[in-house]
Image: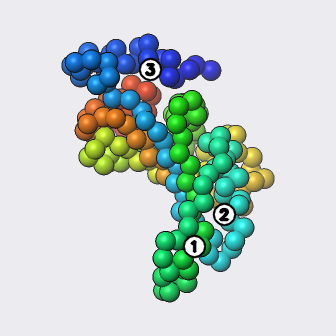
Amino acid sequence: MIDLYQEYKNTIEPKLMKELNCPNIMAVPRLQKIVINCGLGEALTDKGVIDKMAKQIAIIVGQKPQVNRAKKSISTFKLREGDAIGLKATLRRKRMYDFFLRLTSIALPRVRDFHGVPKSGFDGRGNYTLGIAEQTIFPELEYSLIDKVRGFSATFVTTAKNDHEAKLLLEALGMPFEKG
């Protein structure tokens, strides 16, 4: 399997430096971290959901996710302060590049009727968020572990100053954006 970081350092970074007219190599945009976030509102009624999904996300991303808890009580939703309501995993360095490579080369091509990821996920400051509708697109996840199909989001945090630079970076790394 190729090492995406070495490919970035050797070929993508010099190409982006020339394309974006960066004054030095430190001004070239790079991937800083990938944040995986999974909201589990159903955990209020079924406490085992957090453990099941934590195990699945740990297999997908390669590290144990952190449990997000409610900051304040909301009586309409029967939510109490401190209840577990989601999971979060922040990937950096090698795990980040490994996850990015598995997502773009293995998982996304397995999506039915896939025509590329939407370009509308940019936030205006060079970060991109991709919603993944079901965790079953990752082949390392065994079907016996899956009790219900759940989705999560992946936010790609870059050092790019704007969306154009971030899009060029993600395209160079292999993100398949939709045509048109």
Circle 1 residue: 82
Check if mark 2's residue and mark 3's residue have beta carbons within 8 Å.
no
Coordinates of residue 90 in the picture (x, y in percent):
53, 45
User: Which residue is the site of mark 2?
Assistant: 50
Quadrant for the C terminus in the image: top left
Is residue 54 visible in the rendered image? The answer is yes
Specify few, some or many for label 3: CA neighbours under 10 Å numbering under 14, 14-19, or 20 or more: some
Q: Amino acid at mark 2?
A: Ile
Where residue 48 appears, as percent x and y from the top left, is: 72, 67
Residue at image x 39%, y 18%? 12
On screen, 122 above or below 50? above
For marks 2 and 3, the one nearer the N-term is 3
Q: Is residue 172 above or below residue 148?
A: above
Q: Secondary structure at mark 3?
A: helix
In the depicted view, which residue is nearer to us: 50 or 105?
50
Task: Give x and y (percent) for residue 26.
Answer: 32, 22
Kind of residue indicated by mark 1: Gly
Q: Which mark is residue 8?
A: 3
Closer-to-camera residue (6/105): 6
* Res 151 seen here: no
The quadrant in which the N terminus is found is top right
Q: Is residue 179 left or right of residue 153?
A: left
Name the element at disc 1.
loop
Residues at marks 1 and 3, CA–CA distance in whole angstroms: 41 Å
